[in-house]
Amino acid sequence: MKNIKILLALLAIVSLSIACTTDDNSDSGSGSSSKARVVSKIIFEGDDEVEEYAFKYDSDGRITRVTYSADDYYVKRYYNYGSDNELEIVKESGGDAYGGDHSYTTYALLNNKGYMTLLDNLTTLSYDSKGYLVSVSESDEDWLCEISYLWSGGNIVEMEYMSEEEGDSFSYTATFDYNNKPMSMVNLDLNLVLSCWIGPLYVPYSWGDGLTGRKSKNFMTGWTDYDEEATISWSYDEDGYPKEALVEYDDGYEFCMTIKYKN
Protein backbone atom coordinates (compact mmCIF):
# COMPACT_ATOMS: atom_id res chain seq x y z
CA MET A 1 0.00 0.00 0.00
CA LYS A 2 2.83 2.41 0.76
CA ASN A 3 4.19 1.95 -2.78
CA ILE A 4 0.77 2.75 -4.27
CA LYS A 5 0.52 5.96 -2.29
CA ILE A 6 4.03 7.02 -3.22
CA LEU A 7 3.16 6.44 -6.89
CA LEU A 8 0.07 8.59 -6.50
CA ALA A 9 1.97 11.46 -4.93
CA LEU A 10 3.16 14.02 -7.45
CA LEU A 11 6.59 14.09 -5.84
CA ALA A 12 8.36 10.71 -5.96
CA ILE A 13 10.07 10.39 -2.58
CA VAL A 14 12.27 7.61 -1.23
CA SER A 15 10.75 5.84 1.80
CA LEU A 16 12.83 6.01 4.95
CA SER A 17 12.68 4.53 8.45
CA ILE A 18 13.42 6.41 11.67
CA ALA A 19 12.50 6.74 15.34
CA CYS A 20 12.30 10.06 17.17
CA THR A 21 11.43 11.19 20.68
CA THR A 22 7.78 12.14 21.09
CA ASP A 23 5.44 13.20 23.85
CA ASP A 24 1.93 11.93 24.39
CA ASN A 25 -0.08 13.16 21.43
CA SER A 26 -3.17 14.20 23.37
CA ASP A 27 -1.74 15.96 26.42
CA SER A 28 1.52 17.57 25.27
CA GLY A 29 1.71 21.26 24.48
CA SER A 30 -0.83 23.91 25.38
CA GLY A 31 -1.02 25.62 21.99
CA SER A 32 -1.97 28.74 23.91
CA SER A 33 -0.44 31.24 21.48
CA SER A 34 -2.94 32.79 19.06
CA LYS A 35 -0.33 33.72 16.45
CA ALA A 36 0.36 31.14 13.78
CA ARG A 37 4.04 30.33 13.39
CA VAL A 38 5.40 30.18 9.85
CA VAL A 39 6.92 26.86 8.79
CA SER A 40 10.24 27.36 7.01
CA LYS A 41 11.50 23.80 6.73
CA ILE A 42 10.31 20.19 7.06
CA ILE A 43 12.87 17.40 7.55
CA PHE A 44 12.33 13.65 7.12
CA GLU A 45 15.10 11.41 8.45
CA GLY A 46 16.00 7.73 8.46
CA ASP A 47 18.75 5.16 7.94
CA ASP A 48 21.47 7.84 7.69
CA GLU A 49 19.47 9.65 4.98
CA VAL A 50 17.90 13.10 5.20
CA GLU A 51 15.21 14.57 2.96
CA GLU A 52 14.21 18.19 3.33
CA TYR A 53 11.52 20.62 2.19
CA ALA A 54 12.14 24.38 2.45
CA PHE A 55 9.36 26.96 1.99
CA LYS A 56 9.37 30.57 0.79
CA TYR A 57 6.38 32.95 0.98
CA ASP A 58 5.25 36.30 -0.42
CA SER A 59 4.02 39.27 1.61
CA ASP A 60 0.49 37.80 1.61
CA GLY A 61 1.72 34.56 3.17
CA ARG A 62 1.28 32.53 -0.02
CA ILE A 63 3.86 29.89 -0.89
CA THR A 64 6.12 31.06 -3.71
CA ARG A 65 8.72 28.27 -3.67
CA VAL A 66 9.06 24.75 -2.31
CA THR A 67 12.51 23.16 -2.50
CA TYR A 68 12.92 19.42 -1.98
CA SER A 69 16.45 18.12 -1.55
CA ALA A 70 18.09 14.76 -0.91
CA ASP A 71 21.63 13.45 -1.27
CA ASP A 72 21.57 12.92 -5.03
CA TYR A 73 18.82 15.15 -6.42
CA TYR A 74 16.61 18.18 -5.83
CA VAL A 75 13.22 19.48 -6.95
CA LYS A 76 12.17 23.13 -6.86
CA ARG A 77 8.63 24.34 -7.48
CA TYR A 78 7.98 28.04 -8.09
CA TYR A 79 4.44 29.38 -7.65
CA ASN A 80 3.71 32.42 -9.81
CA TYR A 81 0.34 34.01 -9.05
CA GLY A 82 -1.10 35.89 -12.00
CA SER A 83 -4.24 37.84 -12.81
CA ASP A 84 -7.62 36.29 -13.60
CA ASN A 85 -7.18 33.60 -10.91
CA GLU A 86 -4.34 31.90 -12.77
CA LEU A 87 -1.39 30.12 -11.16
CA GLU A 88 1.80 29.02 -12.93
CA ILE A 89 3.84 26.28 -11.25
CA VAL A 90 7.37 25.83 -12.58
CA LYS A 91 9.15 22.63 -11.60
CA GLU A 92 12.93 22.44 -11.79
CA SER A 93 14.80 19.22 -10.98
CA GLY A 94 18.36 18.06 -11.14
CA GLY A 95 21.11 15.97 -9.64
CA ASP A 96 22.52 12.52 -10.25
CA ALA A 97 19.15 10.78 -9.92
CA TYR A 98 17.71 12.86 -12.78
CA GLY A 99 20.74 12.70 -15.05
CA GLY A 100 20.94 16.47 -15.36
CA ASP A 101 18.71 19.51 -15.02
CA HIS A 102 15.09 19.52 -16.17
CA SER A 103 12.26 22.05 -16.17
CA TYR A 104 8.50 21.67 -16.51
CA THR A 105 5.64 24.17 -16.22
CA THR A 106 2.07 23.39 -15.23
CA TYR A 107 -0.92 25.70 -14.83
CA ALA A 108 -3.83 25.92 -12.43
CA LEU A 109 -7.04 27.91 -12.11
CA LEU A 110 -8.18 29.29 -8.77
CA ASN A 111 -11.65 30.30 -7.59
CA ASN A 112 -12.46 33.66 -5.99
CA LYS A 113 -11.28 32.32 -2.61
CA GLY A 114 -7.90 31.33 -4.01
CA TYR A 115 -8.64 27.58 -4.01
CA MET A 116 -7.36 25.46 -6.89
CA THR A 117 -10.18 24.18 -9.11
CA LEU A 118 -8.32 22.91 -12.19
CA LEU A 119 -4.74 21.69 -12.58
CA ASP A 120 -3.17 21.19 -16.01
CA ASN A 121 -6.60 20.40 -17.52
CA LEU A 122 -6.35 16.95 -15.88
CA THR A 123 -7.25 17.42 -12.24
CA THR A 124 -10.52 18.92 -10.99
CA LEU A 125 -11.03 19.90 -7.34
CA SER A 126 -14.41 20.67 -5.74
CA TYR A 127 -15.34 22.32 -2.44
CA ASP A 128 -18.39 22.63 -0.22
CA SER A 129 -20.00 25.94 0.80
CA LYS A 130 -17.68 26.21 3.81
CA GLY A 131 -14.53 25.91 1.67
CA TYR A 132 -13.61 22.32 2.53
CA LEU A 133 -12.24 20.07 -0.23
CA VAL A 134 -14.81 17.36 -0.97
CA SER A 135 -13.57 15.70 -4.17
CA VAL A 136 -10.61 15.34 -6.53
CA SER A 137 -10.91 13.86 -10.02
CA GLU A 138 -8.00 13.12 -12.36
CA SER A 139 -8.20 11.67 -15.84
CA ASP A 140 -6.44 11.32 -19.15
CA GLU A 141 -6.74 8.83 -22.01
CA ASP A 142 -5.53 5.87 -19.93
CA TRP A 143 -6.12 6.87 -16.32
CA LEU A 144 -9.06 7.78 -14.08
CA CYS A 145 -8.85 8.62 -10.40
CA GLU A 146 -11.69 9.83 -8.18
CA ILE A 147 -11.37 10.71 -4.49
CA SER A 148 -14.01 11.95 -2.06
CA TYR A 149 -13.46 13.39 1.41
CA LEU A 150 -15.87 13.34 4.37
CA TRP A 151 -15.33 16.10 6.94
CA SER A 152 -16.54 16.20 10.54
CA GLY A 153 -15.65 18.77 13.17
CA GLY A 154 -13.23 20.48 10.80
CA ASN A 155 -11.24 17.32 9.98
CA ILE A 156 -11.30 14.71 7.22
CA VAL A 157 -12.60 11.57 8.91
CA GLU A 158 -12.99 9.38 5.83
CA MET A 159 -11.57 9.22 2.31
CA GLU A 160 -12.86 7.05 -0.53
CA TYR A 161 -10.43 6.35 -3.36
CA MET A 162 -11.07 4.76 -6.77
CA SER A 163 -8.83 4.44 -9.84
CA GLU A 164 -9.02 2.73 -13.21
CA GLU A 165 -6.19 2.09 -15.66
CA GLU A 166 -6.28 -0.08 -18.79
CA GLY A 167 -9.39 -1.91 -17.59
CA ASP A 168 -8.10 -2.59 -14.08
CA SER A 169 -9.72 -0.88 -11.11
CA PHE A 170 -8.69 -0.34 -7.52
CA SER A 171 -10.57 1.20 -4.59
CA TYR A 172 -10.33 1.56 -0.85
CA THR A 173 -11.69 3.55 2.08
CA ALA A 174 -9.52 5.11 4.77
CA THR A 175 -10.56 6.55 8.13
CA PHE A 176 -8.65 9.05 10.28
CA ASP A 177 -8.34 10.06 13.95
CA TYR A 178 -7.26 13.37 15.51
CA ASN A 179 -6.23 14.95 18.80
CA ASN A 180 -7.59 18.21 20.21
CA LYS A 181 -4.62 20.46 19.41
CA PRO A 182 -5.44 23.40 17.08
CA MET A 183 -3.80 23.38 13.65
CA SER A 184 -4.34 27.14 13.61
CA MET A 185 -1.11 27.52 15.61
CA VAL A 186 0.87 26.93 12.35
CA ASN A 187 0.42 28.36 8.85
CA LEU A 188 0.47 25.02 6.99
CA ASP A 189 -1.75 21.97 7.37
CA LEU A 190 0.88 19.56 8.70
CA ASN A 191 -1.43 16.60 8.10
CA LEU A 192 -1.16 17.28 4.37
CA VAL A 193 2.58 17.90 4.57
CA LEU A 194 2.93 14.37 5.97
CA SER A 195 0.70 13.09 3.19
CA CYS A 196 2.77 14.72 0.45
CA TRP A 197 5.64 12.51 1.57
CA ILE A 198 4.05 9.10 1.98
CA GLY A 199 0.29 9.33 2.55
CA PRO A 200 -2.25 8.71 3.95
CA LEU A 201 -4.19 11.51 2.19
CA TYR A 202 -3.77 12.32 -1.49
CA VAL A 203 -4.33 15.98 -2.38
CA PRO A 204 -2.42 17.08 -5.53
CA TYR A 205 0.12 19.90 -5.18
CA SER A 206 -1.05 20.70 -1.67
CA TRP A 207 0.92 21.62 1.42
CA GLY A 208 -2.15 22.76 3.30
CA ASP A 209 -1.20 26.26 2.22
CA GLY A 210 -4.67 27.46 1.25
CA LEU A 211 -4.57 26.32 -2.38
CA THR A 212 -6.83 23.33 -1.67
CA GLY A 213 -9.37 24.82 0.69
CA ARG A 214 -9.60 25.15 4.43
CA LYS A 215 -7.04 23.25 6.46
CA SER A 216 -7.59 20.67 9.20
CA LYS A 217 -8.77 21.87 12.59
CA ASN A 218 -6.61 19.39 14.54
CA PHE A 219 -3.55 17.15 14.20
CA MET A 220 -4.02 13.64 12.81
CA THR A 221 -3.10 10.86 15.23
CA GLY A 222 -3.64 7.81 13.03
CA TRP A 223 -5.46 6.15 10.16
CA THR A 224 -6.78 2.81 8.96
CA ASP A 225 -7.30 1.58 5.43
CA TYR A 226 -7.76 -1.79 3.78
CA ASP A 227 -4.32 -3.24 4.50
CA GLU A 228 -2.64 -1.14 7.19
CA GLU A 229 -2.97 0.91 10.34
CA ALA A 230 -0.67 3.67 11.54
CA THR A 231 -0.35 6.04 14.48
CA ILE A 232 1.11 9.55 14.56
CA SER A 233 2.63 10.83 17.81
CA TRP A 234 3.27 14.58 17.98
CA SER A 235 5.70 16.35 20.30
CA TYR A 236 5.50 20.05 21.11
CA ASP A 237 7.88 22.74 22.28
CA GLU A 238 7.51 24.69 25.52
CA ASP A 239 5.14 27.16 23.83
CA GLY A 240 2.87 24.40 22.53
CA TYR A 241 3.95 24.45 18.88
CA PRO A 242 4.51 21.09 17.11
CA LYS A 243 8.15 20.18 16.62
CA GLU A 244 8.12 16.48 15.61
CA ALA A 245 5.77 13.77 14.38
CA LEU A 246 6.59 10.07 14.65
CA VAL A 247 4.61 7.86 12.24
CA GLU A 248 4.48 4.15 13.17
CA TYR A 249 2.86 1.52 10.96
CA ASP A 250 1.46 -1.75 12.28
CA ASP A 251 4.10 -3.68 10.31
CA GLY A 252 6.95 -1.94 12.14
CA TYR A 253 7.78 0.68 9.51
CA GLU A 254 8.27 4.19 10.95
CA PHE A 255 9.64 7.61 10.10
CA CYS A 256 9.98 11.00 11.76
CA MET A 257 9.08 14.50 10.56
CA THR A 258 10.74 17.55 12.14
CA ILE A 259 9.26 21.06 11.79
CA LYS A 260 11.38 24.22 11.69
CA TYR A 261 9.95 27.75 11.93
CA LYS A 262 10.70 31.13 10.45
CA ASN A 263 9.60 33.01 13.56
Image (tube, grey):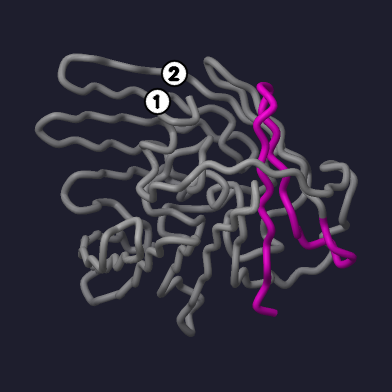
Residue 214, image x, y percentages: 51, 53
- Residue placed most toward the observer, 192 or 11: 11
Q: Which stretch appears magenta? A: 236-263
**Residue found at the very far left of the displayed protein:** 141
How busy is the neighbourhood of tag 1: few (under 14 within 10 Å), some, or many (20 plus)?
Answer: some
The residue to which callout 1 is attached is 161
Q: Amino acid at mark 2?
A: Tyr
Q: Note whether 128 is above or below 2 in the view shown.
A: below
Does residue 37 show up magenta in the picture?
A: no
Q: Which residue is mark 2?
A: 172
In the image: residue 149, left or right of residue 225: left
Residue 6: give x, y in percent of width and height. 43, 38
Q: Amino acid at mark 1?
A: Tyr
User: Whole-percent x and y of residue 142?
Assistant: 13, 29
Residue 45 in percent (x, y) is at: 64, 53
* Residue occupying image coordinates x 57% and y 47%: 194
| Picture quadrant of residue 89 | bottom left
User: Viewer-proximal residue, 162 or 228?
Assistant: 228
Q: Is residue 66 left or right of residue 82?
A: right
